[in-house]
Image (cartoon, rainbow, N blue to C red):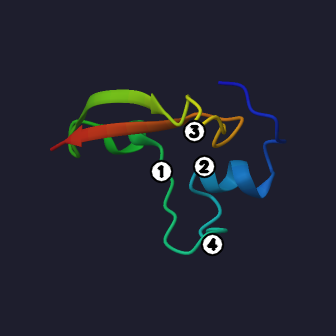
Amino acid sequence: MQLNAEPDADEVRLLCGHNKTPVVPGLVLVDAWRYADPLAGHVMDARRTGDLPVEGVWPSDHAAVVVDLAS
């Protein structure tokens, strides 16, 4: 994975779970693989979203990743 931010940037710290204060209230980002160990379940599916324009407008220059976990 390649990001356009430095490893200690707030955005990357939030992605990695090191920054506990989200920029957007209620926003939660976690590393799915951290929760996919044998004790906490496994990854059922992973897919990109937000990777197509909506009514001709791109939502972001980054696609989102959605992961389904099973316990």
Q: Amino acid at mark 2?
A: Leu
Between discs 3 and 4, the one toward the N terminus: 4
Is there CB contact under 8 Å for labels 1 and 4? no
Q: Is residue 13 above or below residue 50?
A: below
Question: From this viewpoint, which residue is outermost toward the front?
Answer: 55
Look at the image and tell me in which quarter the N terminus lies.
top right
Q: Quadrant of residue 52?
A: top right
Between discs 1 and 4, the one toward the N terminus: 4
Is there CB contact under 8 Å for labels 3 and 2? no
Look at the image and tell me in which quarter the C terminus lies.
top left
Relative to the observer, which residue lies in front, 68 or 40?
Answer: 68
Q: Amino acid at mark 1?
A: Val
* Alpha carbon separation for disc pair 4 and 2: 11 Å
* Alpha carbon separation for disc pair 3 and 4: 32 Å
Q: Which residue is mark 3?
A: 55
Q: Which residue is mark 2?
A: 15
